[in-house]
Image (cartoon, grey):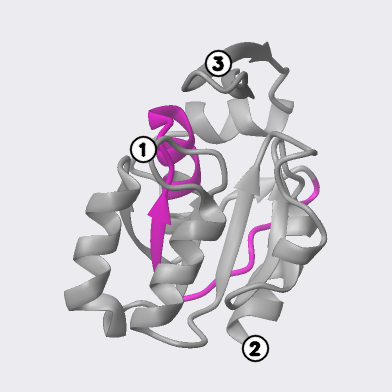
Amino acid sequence: GIRDQPQSRGLGDVYKRQIFNLPKEWDQIMSNNESSQEPVKIGEALLRVGNETVLLIDDEPMMIRLVTKMFTKSGYKVVSFLDAKKALLHFATQGQDYDLVITDYDMPNLNGNELAEQLNGILPNIPIILMTGCDKCVNEQSRHFHSIVGVLKNPFKHQEINNLLTKALNT
Protein backbone atom coordinates (compact mmCIF):
# COMPACT_ATOMS: atom_id res chain seq x y z
CA GLY A 1 0.00 0.00 0.00
CA ILE A 2 1.00 3.60 -0.35
CA ARG A 3 0.32 6.27 2.25
CA ASP A 4 1.13 9.96 2.09
CA GLN A 5 2.33 11.16 5.50
CA PRO A 6 2.01 14.85 6.46
CA GLN A 7 5.27 16.63 7.10
CA SER A 8 4.91 19.96 8.88
CA ARG A 9 7.20 22.70 7.60
CA GLY A 10 5.13 25.72 8.55
CA LEU A 11 4.13 26.46 4.95
CA GLY A 12 0.99 24.39 4.66
CA ASP A 13 0.68 20.67 4.24
CA VAL A 14 3.59 18.83 2.70
CA TYR A 15 3.36 15.06 2.26
CA LYS A 16 6.00 12.34 2.29
CA ARG A 17 5.08 9.13 0.51
CA GLN A 18 5.39 6.01 2.67
CA ILE A 19 5.18 2.54 1.13
CA PHE A 20 4.21 -0.39 3.35
CA ASN A 21 3.47 -4.05 2.71
CA LEU A 22 -0.05 -5.25 3.29
CA PRO A 23 -0.49 -8.57 5.10
CA LYS A 24 -1.31 -11.59 2.90
CA GLU A 25 -4.70 -11.79 4.61
CA TRP A 26 -5.65 -8.40 3.15
CA ASP A 27 -4.93 -9.66 -0.37
CA GLN A 28 -7.12 -12.67 0.33
CA ILE A 29 -9.95 -10.47 1.59
CA MET A 30 -9.82 -8.23 -1.48
CA SER A 31 -9.66 -11.18 -3.90
CA ASN A 32 -12.48 -13.19 -2.28
CA ASN A 33 -15.60 -13.67 -4.33
CA GLU A 34 -17.78 -10.58 -3.87
CA SER A 35 -20.96 -12.66 -3.70
CA SER A 36 -19.73 -14.80 -0.80
CA GLN A 37 -21.60 -14.14 2.43
CA GLU A 38 -19.15 -16.04 4.63
CA PRO A 39 -17.57 -14.10 7.51
CA VAL A 40 -14.12 -12.83 6.64
CA LYS A 41 -11.23 -14.95 7.81
CA ILE A 42 -8.19 -12.91 8.79
CA GLY A 43 -5.22 -15.16 9.39
CA GLU A 44 -6.44 -17.99 11.58
CA ALA A 45 -9.51 -16.27 13.01
CA LEU A 46 -12.82 -14.91 11.79
CA LEU A 47 -13.75 -11.27 12.19
CA ARG A 48 -16.19 -10.92 15.08
CA VAL A 49 -19.68 -11.39 13.63
CA GLY A 50 -22.15 -8.60 14.33
CA ASN A 51 -25.18 -6.76 13.01
CA GLU A 52 -24.31 -3.24 14.12
CA THR A 53 -24.10 -0.20 11.84
CA VAL A 54 -20.65 1.31 11.36
CA LEU A 55 -19.73 4.75 10.04
CA LEU A 56 -16.38 4.40 8.26
CA ILE A 57 -14.31 7.47 7.34
CA ASP A 58 -11.03 7.26 5.45
CA ASP A 59 -9.59 9.38 2.66
CA GLU A 60 -8.04 6.32 0.99
CA PRO A 61 -10.43 4.42 -1.31
CA MET A 62 -8.46 1.19 -0.90
CA MET A 63 -8.97 1.24 2.88
CA ILE A 64 -12.67 2.01 2.45
CA ARG A 65 -13.04 -1.00 0.12
CA LEU A 66 -11.02 -3.32 2.36
CA VAL A 67 -12.67 -2.44 5.68
CA THR A 68 -16.16 -2.32 4.14
CA LYS A 69 -15.71 -5.75 2.63
CA MET A 70 -14.37 -7.21 5.88
CA PHE A 71 -17.23 -5.83 7.93
CA THR A 72 -20.15 -6.41 5.56
CA LYS A 73 -19.17 -10.06 5.11
CA SER A 74 -19.32 -10.44 8.88
CA GLY A 75 -22.82 -9.01 9.14
CA TYR A 76 -22.19 -5.32 9.80
CA LYS A 77 -23.85 -2.54 7.86
CA VAL A 78 -21.20 -0.03 6.75
CA VAL A 79 -21.74 3.52 5.54
CA SER A 80 -18.51 5.06 4.31
CA PHE A 81 -17.16 8.49 3.48
CA LEU A 82 -13.91 9.59 1.85
CA ASP A 83 -14.32 13.12 3.22
CA ALA A 84 -14.41 13.77 6.97
CA LYS A 85 -16.40 17.01 6.66
CA LYS A 86 -19.11 15.31 4.59
CA ALA A 87 -19.21 12.47 7.12
CA LEU A 88 -19.62 15.00 9.92
CA LEU A 89 -22.54 16.71 8.14
CA HIS A 90 -24.18 13.31 7.61
CA PHE A 91 -23.60 12.32 11.24
CA ALA A 92 -25.19 15.56 12.44
CA THR A 93 -28.55 14.37 11.09
CA GLN A 94 -28.15 10.58 11.23
CA GLY A 95 -25.76 9.94 14.14
CA GLN A 96 -28.34 8.00 16.12
CA ASP A 97 -28.30 5.34 13.37
CA TYR A 98 -24.71 4.30 14.18
CA ASP A 99 -23.31 1.94 16.78
CA LEU A 100 -19.65 2.65 16.03
CA VAL A 101 -17.40 5.05 14.12
CA ILE A 102 -14.13 3.89 12.57
CA THR A 103 -12.03 6.71 11.20
CA ASP A 104 -8.60 7.30 9.80
CA TYR A 105 -6.50 9.62 11.92
CA ASP A 106 -4.52 11.30 9.18
CA MET A 107 -6.94 13.02 6.80
CA PRO A 108 -6.91 16.38 5.05
CA ASN A 109 -8.83 19.25 6.64
CA LEU A 110 -9.91 17.34 9.77
CA ASN A 111 -7.79 14.78 11.63
CA GLY A 112 -9.19 11.89 13.64
CA ASN A 113 -9.00 13.69 17.00
CA GLU A 114 -10.75 16.78 15.64
CA LEU A 115 -13.41 14.63 14.02
CA ALA A 116 -13.86 12.62 17.25
CA GLU A 117 -14.36 15.83 19.22
CA GLN A 118 -17.06 17.03 16.83
CA LEU A 119 -18.78 13.65 16.61
CA ASN A 120 -18.79 13.48 20.39
CA GLY A 121 -20.41 16.92 20.52
CA ILE A 122 -23.25 15.58 18.38
CA LEU A 123 -23.64 12.20 20.05
CA PRO A 124 -21.74 11.86 23.33
CA ASN A 125 -20.19 8.46 24.02
CA ILE A 126 -20.38 7.14 20.45
CA PRO A 127 -17.55 4.58 20.38
CA ILE A 128 -14.77 5.61 18.00
CA ILE A 129 -11.85 3.57 16.68
CA LEU A 130 -8.96 5.45 15.08
CA MET A 131 -6.95 3.83 12.28
CA THR A 132 -3.47 5.07 11.48
CA GLY A 133 -0.34 4.07 9.65
CA CYS A 134 1.66 6.67 11.53
CA ASP A 135 3.03 5.75 14.97
CA LYS A 136 3.78 9.35 15.90
CA CYS A 137 0.40 10.75 14.82
CA VAL A 138 -1.62 9.35 17.71
CA ASN A 139 -0.29 9.99 21.19
CA GLU A 140 -1.33 8.35 24.45
CA GLN A 141 -3.56 11.31 25.35
CA SER A 142 -5.66 10.91 22.19
CA ARG A 143 -6.32 7.26 23.04
CA HIS A 144 -8.50 8.41 25.97
CA PHE A 145 -10.10 11.36 24.24
CA HIS A 146 -13.68 11.84 23.04
CA SER A 147 -14.99 8.27 23.22
CA ILE A 148 -11.98 6.83 21.39
CA VAL A 149 -11.95 3.20 22.48
CA GLY A 150 -8.73 2.33 20.72
CA VAL A 151 -6.28 2.77 17.89
CA LEU A 152 -5.77 0.33 15.03
CA LYS A 153 -2.28 0.52 13.57
CA ASN A 154 -2.23 -0.19 9.82
CA PRO A 155 -1.68 -2.84 8.73
CA PHE A 156 -3.78 -4.26 11.55
CA LYS A 157 -4.18 -7.85 12.71
CA HIS A 158 -7.42 -9.77 13.24
CA GLN A 159 -7.03 -9.99 17.00
CA GLU A 160 -6.62 -6.21 17.27
CA ILE A 161 -9.85 -5.64 15.33
CA ASN A 162 -11.76 -8.22 17.36
CA ASN A 163 -10.51 -6.83 20.67
CA LEU A 164 -11.51 -3.28 19.74
CA LEU A 165 -14.90 -4.35 18.35
CA THR A 166 -15.65 -6.21 21.57
CA LYS A 167 -14.54 -3.22 23.66
CA ALA A 168 -16.45 -0.71 21.50
CA LEU A 169 -19.68 -2.67 21.27
CA ASN A 170 -19.64 -4.03 24.87
CA THR A 171 -20.34 -7.63 23.98
First in sequence: mark 2 vs mark 3: 3
Q: Which residue is mark 2?
A: 170
Q: Residue 62: where, in percent of width, then height?
A: 44, 28
Q: Residue 126: where, in percent of width, then height?
A: 48, 81
Magenta segment boundaries in residue numbering: 44-68
Q: Say above or below: 144 vs 104.
A: below
* Amino acid on which disc 2 is placed: Asn
Q: Secondary structure at mark 3?
A: strand
As measured in the structure, the alpha-carbon distance from the residue carrying label 1 to the one carrying label 2 is 30 Å
Q: Is residue 165 left or right of residue 34?
A: right
* Amino acid on which disc 1 is placed: Glu
Task: Specify few, some or many for label 2: CA neighbours under 10 Å numbering under 14, 14-19, or 20 or more.
Answer: few
Q: Are marks 2 and 3 in contact (CB under 8 Å)?
A: no
Quarter occupied by the C terminus: bottom right
Q: Secondary structure at mark 2?
A: loop
Quadrant assignment, res 135: top right
Q: Which residue is mark 1?
A: 34
Verify whether residue 89 appears in magenta: no
